[in-house]
Image (cartoon, grey):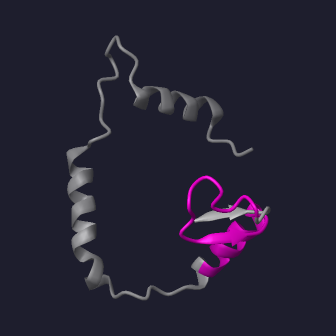
Amino acid sequence: MHIDIDPTSISKTVNADIPVVGDARVVLEQMLELLAQDTPSQPRDDIRDWWQQIERWRARQCLKYDAESESIKPQAVIETLWRLTKATRT
């Protein structure tokens, strides 16, 4: 998906599968409104395998890292930025 207010920019560098012309803030707000109203079109059973895979990934704790390591870990950087900015929105 490529959202851009300038129609000549859409698919200029990378081909957009879903081109959307408009102000990104407005378009995203409209998309969020639609998603909030939408009821799932697929029954939960259709995506059960996918959720089971997600649970297997979570159980592996793949983002766990050694916080005492002397080398800088990307996860530690993200955690520190999150803590220092308190996840403030700009």
Where residue 59 sits: x, y (%)? 21, 51
Q: Between residue 64 and residue 21, name the one nearer to us.
A: 21
Asked whether, in this view, residue 50 is left or right of residue 7, the answer is left
Residue 35 to residue 63: above or below: below
Q: Residue at x 68, y 62 (%)?
A: 10
* 26 within the magenta span: yes
Residue 15, compared with residue 45, is above or below; it is: above
Residue 11 placement (x, y as % from top left): 63, 61
Q: How many marks overall?
A: 0
* 61 or 41: nearer the viewer: 41
Residue 27: x percent and y percent? 72, 70
**Residue drawn at x 26%, y 43% as measured from the top left:** 61
Q: Give the residue at x 27% y 83%.
A: 46
Image quarter where the C terminus lies is: top right
Q: Nearer the viewer, residue 61 or 31?
A: 31
In the picture, residue 19 is in which quadrant? Answer: bottom right
Left or right for 75, reference 53: right
Q: Residue 40: where, in percent of width, then height?
A: 44, 85
User: Looking at this rendering, what residue extends furthest in the top direction?
Assistant: 70
Q: Where, by quadrant of the figure, is residue 20 drawn?
A: bottom right
Quadrant including the N terminus: bottom right
Task: Please determine whether, in this image, residue 52 is positioned above or below residue 63.
Answer: below
In-image side of 55 versus 70 (left or right):
left
Provide the residue span drawn in magenta: 8-34
* Location of residue 12 with respect to 47 vertically, above or below: above
